[in-house]
Image (cartoon, coloured by chain):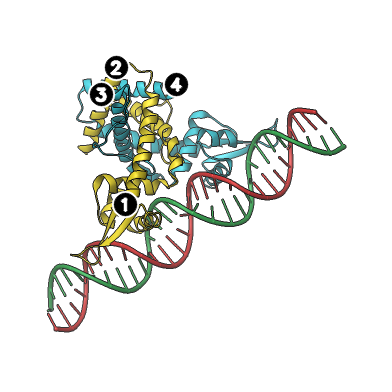
Chain colours: A yellow, B cyan, C red, D green
Amino acid sequence: MLALLSVCDAKLWRMPRSKEPFRFEVADRLHSATIHLLRHARQQDVVARQGPARLSALSVLVFGGPMALGQLAAAEQVKAPTMSRIVAGLKRSGLARIETDAKDARRIRVTATAKGERLLQQARVRRIRLVAKTLTNLSPAELEILRRAAELMERAVRQT
Amino acid sequence: MLALLSVCDAKLWRMPRSKEPFRFEVADRLHSATIHLLRHARQQDVVARQGPARLSALSVLVFGGPMALGQLAAAEQVKAPTMSRIVAGLKRSGLARIETDAKDARRIRVTATAKGERLLQQARVRRIRLVAKTLTNLSPAELEILRRAAELMERAVRQT
DNA sequence: TATACTTCGTTAGCAATGCTAAGCAATTAG
DNA sequence: CTAATTGCTTAGCATTGCTAACGAAGTATA
């Protein structure tokens, strides 16, 4: 259930030799902290009655729009056969629908249904609410630090 | 592969009514950013040749010391049968060993082996290195923001 | 045009991980 | 001493990863 989320947790840990030890220290702490935060947020996901892979794929469909199976697999960093089964599950549950591509008969077009969008938004609300709840005791200045940190993380990852 | 890591990604999303909208905005951004950061870090885990559940359990053993199966299951937020199988796998791979508890014959004592510690540390180094690499272009001031953010996240989650 | 590659998706079969239900053995309560 | 509780395992199911192998459709080339 923890997925890969807790491979490393400890403080007692010697950083590898580096010209920039501070960067490694920050990486270490950030890694650990984000693991703990997300592990906590995940508690809410039981309610959705859908497996993590399906929720995840559904979110890509909802926020990224309809797409072919291969694109979806790439977005989820998963092989095509795996995504094939996930999409089949979403279809069975009425959360996504499949159409054929007019230009290329090999492709399929996967789209989130209204029901799928609704379910995903609800799951999302639950998670965000829980995260917000854990931030309850922080001051505005501390919240500002977190907001800026989020921006920095997004930027850093996107530049990769 | 993404586990629950991408249930929500988008910017276009209306926050629920709240007395503290800023807190929800921060929660949303932080949630998204941490998902992306960890999804990125996870690329390194293929190398370890052990599933995520085993690596995760092993990390608890390495950093938390030997413990009973039930404790380990609780730490990993997993039911006992699941942990039973995970520990069996670790034992098969020579990464953990099982002893009987002298005081209570029902209990078992699971311990990480030297091989297990080595494997975990290597996986850990790979992940941290990758995270550090994505932080390459940040200034010292920006790194400091991330360090403080990590502290805040840890504190917030721990108070739960 | 015909043949051969390539690309896209599916099916089949394996392994890992989650669950509940059921069972066994040891401990604790009454 | 019996009965309830506790700790772990086994059995059986569903989900989600993978590779291998296939068929169908598009593309390139002789």
Which residue is labeled 3 in the image?
Answer: B143
Name the kind of residue labelled 1 in the image.
Thr
Which residue is labeled 4 in the image?
Answer: B159
Q: Residues within 10 Å of mark 3 (few under 14, many from 20)?
A: many
Between D3 and A113, the one nearer to me in the picture: A113
Q: Between marks 3 and 2, how big is the CA–CA gap?
A: 20 Å
Name the kind of residue labelled 3 in the image.
Leu
Identify the residue at horizontal 31%, vertical 20% (top origin). Answer: B148
Q: Residues within 10 Å of mark 1 (few under 14, many from 20)?
A: some
Q: Between marks 1 and 2, how big is the CA–CA gap?
A: 39 Å
Q: Between marks 4 and 3, how big is the CA–CA gap?
A: 25 Å
Q: Is residue B53 above or below residue B18?
A: below
> Is residue A16 visible to us here?
no
Q: Quadrant of residue A67?
A: bottom left
Q: Chain of mark 3?
A: B
> Residue A160: x and y, percent?
22, 39
Q: Between marks 3 and 1, how big is the CA–CA gap?
A: 42 Å
Name the kind of residue labelled 2 in the image.
Pro
Identify the residue at horizontal 68%, vertical 37% (top origin). Answer: B106
